[in-house]
Every structure is written in C-alpha cells, then in structure tokens.
Image: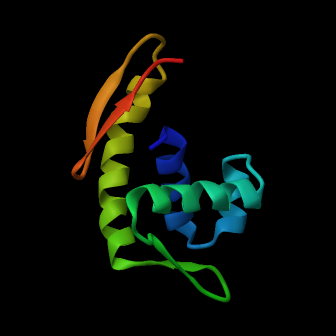
Amino acid sequence: MKFRHLEYFVTAAEELNFTPRCRSVHVSQPPFSKQIHDLEGELGIDLFERQNKGVALTPAGKSFLIDAEASLKIVKPRSEKPNVSVVARLGNWPLVICPR
C-alpha cells in the first residue's frame, strides 16, 4: 500500500466524486481512479459503490476511512521530514513510510 493510495482514498471519500477531487491532488481522473482501484484490489474489498453521479462509501469503505484518516494524521507530518521512517498501523495492516 502506498501513501498516495491513502491520500487519494480520503480525498475521494470527502467529496464522493472522483473528478473534482483528483484536481485537488493535481492528477487527472483516470490515474486517480486507477489508484483507488489498485487500493481496493490490494485490500480485497470494495471501498466505493460506483453510481451514475459520483460514488458512495461501502460499509467497508466507511470503516477504512476512519483508519485511513487516523493514519494520515500520524504519518503525514512525520513523512515530510527528511530521512525519517514512520511506522504506524492502518486498522489491522502495518504501514511503513520510508524516506525517498
């Protein structure tokens, strides 16, 4: 799982529409949607229910959102420091952010 997967997921969950939210992270819609799809594939669950106008969070998506937001609050400030590795948990999943 990549850090940007969490950022994109939380961003999409805030608006429940991929198109306007992908602009806020400076990515076009197809790569943004692919990152969400990759995250769902890695987790083995659907986080969003696709609808005609936008998306809705599934029950699993709502649960994952709580964990993702908590992890980003811990990880994001630390990941911006050079040469700092961060270890956290995302629900039951270990999350490690390594410096570039």
- Rendering quarter of residue 33: bottom right
Above or below residue 82? Residue 59 is below
Residue 55 image position (x, y, % from top left): 57, 78
Q: Nearer the viewer, residue 76 or 33?
A: 33
Percent position of residue 38, x then y: 55, 56
Foreground residue among 71 and 3 = 3
From this view, report whether residue 80 is shown above or below residue 82. Answer: below
Percent position of residue 44, x then y: 40, 64
Left or right relative to 87: residue 24 = right
Q: Which residue is found at the position 74% from the left and 60% from the top?
A: 29
Reply above or below: 91 against 20. above
The quadrant in which the N terminus is found is top left
Q: Can you say which quadrant of the picture contains the C terminus?
A: top right
Please give left or right for residue 52 compared with residue 94 in the image.
right
Residue that protrudes farthest toward the right in the picture: 28
Decide if residue 26 is on the left or right side of residue 98. Answer: right
Residue at (36% x, 52% y) in the render: 68
- The number of numbered badges drawn on the structure is 0
The residue positioned farthest toward the left in the image shown: 92
Q: What residue is drawn where x is 57% and y is 69%?
A: 15
Q: How is the image coloured?
A: rainbow
x 71%, y 64%: residue: 20
**Horizontal and vertical percent for residue 97?**
40, 28
- Which residue of the protein is positioned furthest toward the bottom in this rendering? 52
In this image, 28 relative to 63: left or right?
right
The answer to whether 84 is drawn above or below residue 55 in the figure is above
